[in-house]
Amino acid sequence: MMRYLPHTPEDIESMLAAVGVKDLDGLFATIPEDCRRSEPLDLPTLTEWDLNAHMDRLAAQTVSWDTHKIFAGAGSYHHFIPEAARYVLSRSEFVTAYTPYQPEMSQGTLQGIFEYQTLVCRLLGMEVANASLYDGASALAEALLMAIRIGRTKKKTVAVSALVNPYYRKVVETYFKPTDFKVETIPSKADGTTDLDAIAGIDDLAGVAVQSPNFFGCIEDLQAAGEAIHAQGAVFITAFSEPLAYGLLKTPGSQDADIVCGEGQSLGLSQSFGGPGVGIFTAKQKYVRNMPGRLVGQTLDADGQRGFVLTLSTREQHIRREKATSNICSNQSLCAMAAGIYMATLGGTGFRELAALNRDKSEYLKGALAAAGLVLPFARPTFNEFVVKFPAGFDTRWQKLLTEKKIMCGVPLVCYYPELADHYLLCVTETKSREDLDLLVKEVQP
Amino acid sequence: MNEFVGTQGLILNEPLLWERGRQGRTGYSLPTRDVDPAPLDAAVAGEGPDFPDLSEVEIVRHYTRLSQWNYGVDSGMYPLGSCTMKYNPKTNERQAALPGFAGSHPLVPSELSQGALQLIYELEHHLAHVSGLDAVSVQPAAGAQGELAGMLIFAAYHRDQGRPRSKILIPDTAHGTNPASAALCGYKSVPLATGPDGVLTPEDVAALMDEDTAGLMVTNPNTLGLFETHTRAIADIVHAKGGLIYADGANMNAVMGVVDFGKAGIDVLHINLHKTFSTPHGGGGPGAGPVCVTKTLEPFLPAPRVVKTGESYQLSEDFPKSIGKLNAFYGNFGILVRAYSYILSVGTQLKDVSQHAVLNANYIKEQLKDIYHLPFDKPCMHECVFTDKNLESHKVSTLDLAKRLIDYGFHPPTIYFPLVLQGAIMIEPTESESRENIDQFITTMRAIYQEARENPELLTGAPGNTKVRRLDETTAARKPVLRG
């Protein structure tokens, strides 16, 4: 007996008789010997009670915001998730449904995703959003491939700022490796933003991607970036890893971005060791037929009532096969639903207040660290992340703080930028109190 | 209609979010402001998003009503072919929500993330054991990304051999993601016709396989619900020309504890954790598409990988031949927790899972084949595929049958796939359904057949019991309205 398997021995016997097979093994008669296992499965089998104990033990061996003060973002952010948002998301009609291929019995998912698409467009100032991609990194790779399609594959080079999250850049590299297309890296300037003068020398440019706030937390001048990129005849892509910033900042859409994509984990998803997050993907309306991924659209039913369906699927793999705009099928639908619920729960007013609180706390810490004699090397405005240069040899203290005081003082940048020894990327969200910030300053002051 | 599941009930209307709410409401308790406001440079400052303001009560009602317009596995039988809509165990949700998992930051050093790393390591080993292959990466975020990983591994392997190749063989029954994933790696798809018995023949493969062909992508069991009986012979033909075999494991739920993919000659296999290993589909994701490979191809797996030294686990990037990263961090970890929890709960009874899934599909096939057209009358695996040929004379199609099933309280099967059959009806009951549920489904399918003969407008006008009736998809595509 196993609780997920309803058949009794009598059920099995009578069903086998109806099929005309002697025993359960007889059902597999078409599988030849040269494909069969020689040994039975050898796996542990736990009761629910024992499973809980085992999982509790594993979970306890992984630190979390529950056990440590983690002042790190770098693409994964700790924000408070309201219980009501978590609760409605767990409705099993959302959780246990498939992709809405039968719209009449999937209107909940479809309207929820239509609302997500709308709120995302409003957040980023864009015209169309898809129903989600896997994460911020693959969304950027897809955006660059889309830029090449927009240029009708005549232009074979894309360029990505060195201040785009290094993990996103690695994923871009993976997606581009087997293609004929080239990925160039645009260097950074001393103020912690992208040096767009460098693209003037690159021919054959289909698209250029800049992240804002960038990996150093600095807010890029997207207006100027867009002008420089459009002057080259290239598609202007902006990426992000912290969408909450757009509660305060000018939208990428208002600064003429053609494609805006990034990670939506901040919008009501737990960090969960890096995934699942949600790849947010938006573009100008004129590029909609080049977009990857699913789209939900509004329509009418046979009685003239409003309803929603998956639409423009002639771009997709199940129709276009090798000519599709992407190979994506399953996306991160439930995470997109979570992001929609989160944005709705905060509302416009709450979203802006929360964004301001993140920035204000982060500015408070910046001020206190500078007052303690630490160096903030980049002058550009930031949102909730920023870089601090600590005295040489800080790495041992960083390690000690983590193990002895349970404080993770940011992420060491030297792993990604070898020239930035002793530079750390710190993050402050609404989850850190002033007391936490004061404690951090006390522990790290020279 | 009392004996049937489907009935009518009160369905509540609910407007779009922005048609509700009023400025000045909130659904959120803002954490304490204990610092002063800091001015923001006007050059970067924006106005903030135009979201509606709603109270917590309005939010909860809004989404509760929306959820009631949906149908999930928890609502009833969901025999969507090739999607494996099995029961999603609730204990898996508890495990994924544990603070040490849900609240963990991916960049905390390995020595403080031992539990998460151990889980990944053990899950990879369990999946290798179940598949019969040697090494696994759980990084791909979905089946299609697992396929992409597989194709990137093909390309990297052939490059490493010093002989990049340009073509790939793909059967005409393949899921559309197969050719789309291959195309991302620059491969030209060469279609391979299904043989007269619904499976591939070694002769057809031998005729097309050459030294410019990277290999073959095969779904096994295939999308007709049949086991590809010549897999080993086909693998030998492909290997003899220096090619590789990729197996799409979307239909793995049929063969756990029975098939050894390594022995069958498979080089790369992807598994859908959101199908075979019970993680919920979430209305279209998130899933996970681990990729399993032979020892020879292990160096090409996505990095970083979890390695074990003594009793401790580390993330290692030290795989110079790796295809690289597919995901910002380590994949959909929350989904991995659920699949791991399922494997530990079911253990060696994974074989029973496959046996019951195959039993249910064959039982349905036998009980319906006298009225519905069954193109391949032979033992099936976990799904059986009919067509609408016997409905045509009543001017009723597969789509009408599907919509009528909704009124009776069932999610319809997969329809019009695989493309090689006209009007395909692909039924995958899974192991989760009891004998009574399956009998009720059969009774319903027979009743609908009777309706098709006697009263076809009941089908062509269906569904009638849902929130909305049939939707105008043509206008949706012609004049797209993608936001409100």
Image (cartoon, helix red, strand yellow):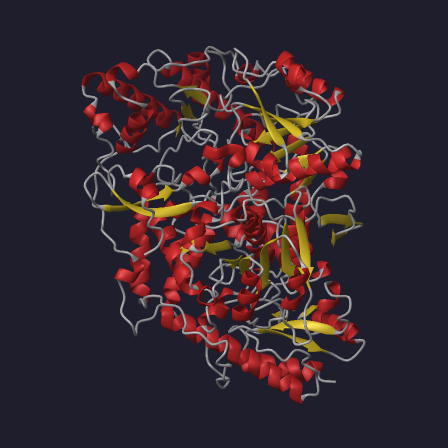
Identify which residue is drawn at 42% across, 46% down.
A95
Tell me: residue B441, above or below residue B198. below
Tell me: residue A240, above or below residue A297. below
Q: Quadrant of residue A376?
A: bottom right
Is residue B171 among what the camera can see?
yes
Identify which residue is drawn at 46% across, 71% down.
A250
Q: How many numbered discs sit on the rendered protein? A: 0
Q: Nearer the viewer, residue B453 or A64?
A: B453
Q: Which quarter of the image is occupied by the C terminus of chain B?
A: bottom left
Tell me: residue B417, above or below residue B11. above
Identify which residue is drawn at 44% across, 21% down.
B384
Position of residue B167 measured from the top left corner of the image (x, y, whole percent): 65, 28
Position of residue A270 measured from the top left corner of the image (x, y, whole percent): 52, 59
Left or right, A109 with reference to B466: right
Identify which residue is drawn at 58% across, 25% down.
B255
Position of residue B399 measured from the top left corner of the image (x, y, whole percent): 32, 28
Q: Nearer the viewer, residue A252 or A45?
A: A252
Left or right, B167 with reference to B141: right
Is residue A42 among what the camera can see?
no
Taking the view exactly as shown, the residue that stands out farthest to the bottom is A371
Left or right, B212 with reference to A6: right
Position of residue A147 measured from the top left corner of the image (x, y, whole percent): 55, 51
Q: Which quarter of the image is occupied by the N terminus of chain B?
A: top left
Q: Nearer the viewer, residue B296 or B74?
A: B296
